[in-house]
Amino acid sequence: MDVMQILRFLLYFIIYSFFGWILESIYKSLIEKKIINSGFLFGPFCPIYGFGACIMILCLEPFKNNAILLFIASFFIMSIWEYIVGWFLEKQFNTKYWDYTGNFLNIKGRVCLKNSTFWGILGLIFMMWIHPVTEKYVIILNNETLLYLNIILLAAIGVDAIITIIKMKSLDSTVEAIKELGETIKVKISELKDLGSDSIEKVKSTEILIEDLKRKQAILKVRLYRYVIRLKKAFPTIKSDSISQLLNQKIDLKALKEKIKKKIDKK
C-alpha cells in the first residue's frame, strides 16, 4: 500500500465516521422525536463506522461481485468487529455501551442475529453502491489536498477522542467525589449539632463550610448529569454502575441550578 492509498483510506475513515454519525443521529432522533447527538464522541463522528467501513473495503473486496458471498462475509466479519469493540469498551471504561441480551441468538449481549443480519445487508449495499461513488470522488483528489484534509480532520477527531476518553475515565471518580462530599457534609452537620451556644463563631464558620460543600457537590452533579444523560440518549441500552447510580437519583437539573445560583448570590 503506497502513500496515496494510505491517505485515501484515512479519508474514507473520516467520511464514513461522519456518515455513520448522520445515520445514527437521524435514527435515534426519529425514535426520541427530538435532535440527538449520537455516538461516543462530542463531534459529528462515529469512529466505529469509520473503522467498520475500512474493514469492509479491505476484507470484502474479493466478494464484491457475488452478492451471496458478500452478505455472508459481511455478516461474520462485522459481527466479529462489533464484538471486539464492545468487549474493548467494557474493559476500558467499565461500561456496556450496547446490550443485546434480550435479543435472539446473542453472544454475551455484544452481538446478536438481528444486528449481524443488518451488518450483512449494510455490507452488501456499501460495497456495491455506496463505496464506488465515494471512491470515484476521493480518487480524483491530489496528494496535497488529501494530506491537508486528513491532518485537519484527524486532528479534530483526535482532540475530541482525548476529551471524551478523559471524561469517561473520570466518570467513576466524579461519582465517588460526589459521594465523599455528601459524607463530609453529614459529618459537618453532626459536628454543628454538637456545638454549644458559646461557640457562635465556630457555628458560623461550620455553616459556611457546609453551604460551600453543598454548592460544590451540586455543581459536580449538574456537570456529570448532563454528560450522563447525553450518553444515555446516544446509547439507550448503556449499562454502568456509575451511570445507574446517578440516573436513579432522579436529579432535577433546574432545581440544582437555582440552588447553586442562590448560594453564589449569598456570597
Image: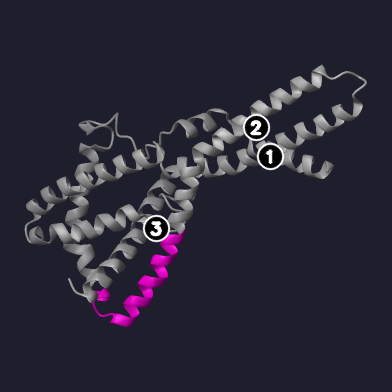
Marks 1, 3: nearer the viewer: 1
Mark 1 in CB contact with mark 2 (< 8 angstroms): yes
Residue at image position (24%, 70%) is: 6
Residue placed under numbered mark 1 in the picture = 216
User: Looking at the picture, how far across and down is residue 191, in whole percent?
Assistant: 77, 21
Q: Amino acid at mark 1?
A: Lys
In the picture, measured across the screen, residue 53 lies left or right of residue 191, that is left
Say which quarter of the image contains residue 103: top left
The kind of secondary structure the magenta stretch mainly shows is helix
User: Looking at the picture, how far across and down is residue 48, in whole percent?
Assistant: 32, 52
User: Looking at the picture, how far across and down is residue 97, in whole percent?
Assistant: 37, 40
Marks 3, 2: nearer the viewer: 2
Is residue 137 part of the magenta span, yes or no? yes
Query: Marks 1 and 3, Cα distance to the nearest angstrom?
Result: 33 Å
Mark 3 in CB contact with mark 2 (< 8 angstroms): no
Image vertical order of residue 87 relative to residue 156, above or below: above
Q: Is residue 36 visible?
A: no
Residue at image position (48%, 54%) is: 163
Residue placed under numbered mark 3 in the picture = 45
Q: Of marks 3 and 2, which one's residue comes earlier in the chain?
A: 3
Quarter placement of the C terminus: top right
Query: Marks 1 and 2, Cα distance to the nearest angstrom?
Result: 8 Å
Mark 1 in CB contact with mark 3 (< 8 angstroms): no
Q: Amino acid at mark 3?
A: Phe
Label 3 element class: loop
Image vertical order of residue 185 relative to residue 61, above or below: above
Say which quarter of the image contains residue 105: top left
Q: Of marks 1 and 2, which one's residue comes earlier in the chain?
A: 2
- Front residue of this view, candidates 264 and 135: 264
Q: Amino acid at mark 2?
A: Leu
Q: Which residues are magenta?
A: 136-159
